[in-house]
Image (spheres, rainbow, N blue to C red):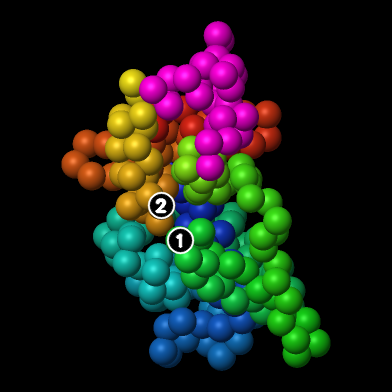
Amino acid sequence: MKRDRMQRLTLSLACVFVVKLACGCATHPDGPASPEATITAFARALNEGNLPAAYAMMSEDYRSHVSAEAWQKLMEENSQEVIEISNSLTHVRGPARVKAELDHVGEGDLVLVQRDGKWFVASDVARVYDQSTPRAALHAFVRAIEHKRYDVVLRLVPNADKEGMTTASLEKAWSGAGRDEISRVVGNLKDHLSGPIEIVGNHATLPYGERMRVQFLREDGVWKIENPE
C-alpha cells in the first residue's frame, strides 16, 4: 500500500513539474511569474508544510480530478517522502522548455515544442499503433479493430492470453458470430477514449460507465490491453 501511495505521490509532483515547468507558465492567477519561480515556490511550500499553498499551484486540470482533501491526505501519509522530493525540486535549473498541447480529433494531445521562437511537432504522428502509454494502446486497439488489423490486435494481447490465438482466429471470431459484440465493445471504448486512467506500476485501469473497465498491462516495454469490456 505504501508503495502505491508513493507512486501516486510521485505522479502528483511530476504533474507539477510537467505542467508548470515544461509549459512555461503558472496557471494560478496569483502564482509566480516564471516556471523556475513556480517550482521554487512549490518546493518551499512543501518544506514549510503549507499544503494549501502548494495545492493552489497545481494545474486547474489536476485540481478538477484531485480534491484539496485528497491531496492533503496523500501528502500527510507520506510526509518524509514529500520533504525528500521537495528538496530535490530545489535543484531544478532553467531555462524551461516551452511546449503546447492541442486536441487531435480524439487521438489525445498533439504536443509541440518551441525552439528559437518557432514551433515544432514533438508527437510521433507516424506511430499509428503506438503502445507507449495505456491511452495510446487504447487508441491503437480501437483503430486496429476498425481497420481489421488483427495482427496489431494480437500485438496488444498480453503474452499469457495469446495461447492458441492467431490473426486468422481473431478475424474468424470477430467477423462472424462475435461481430456484434466486438462492435459494442469498440463503440463503448470510443465514447471513453479520453477518460481518466489510473496507473499503478505495470498495471493501469480505465473505469467507465457504471461497472465497466479496461485493464492494461505493461509487458516487454509496451502497454497491452488485458481485459476490454
- Pick out the residue farthest to the front: 176
Label 1 with label 2: CB-CB less than 8 Å: yes
In this view, 192 is above or below 66: above
Q: Which residues are magenta?
A: 147-176
Please name the amino acid that badge 1 sits on: Gly
Magenta highlight on residue 148: yes
| Crowd around label 1: few <14 · some 14–19 · many ≥20 (10 Å) | few
From where the camera sits, is residue 2 visible?
no
Q: Which residue is mark 1?
A: 106
Q: SS of the residue at dot 1?
A: loop
Question: In x, y percent, where is residue 129?
Answer: 62, 45
Residue at the (22%, 36%) spot, across then down: 211
Marks 1 and 2 sit apart, C-alpha to C-alpha, by: 7 Å
Q: Quadrant of the C terminus?
A: top left
Left-right relation of 84 to 82: right
Q: Which mark is residue 115?
A: none
| Placement of 124 over or under 77, stated as above or below | below
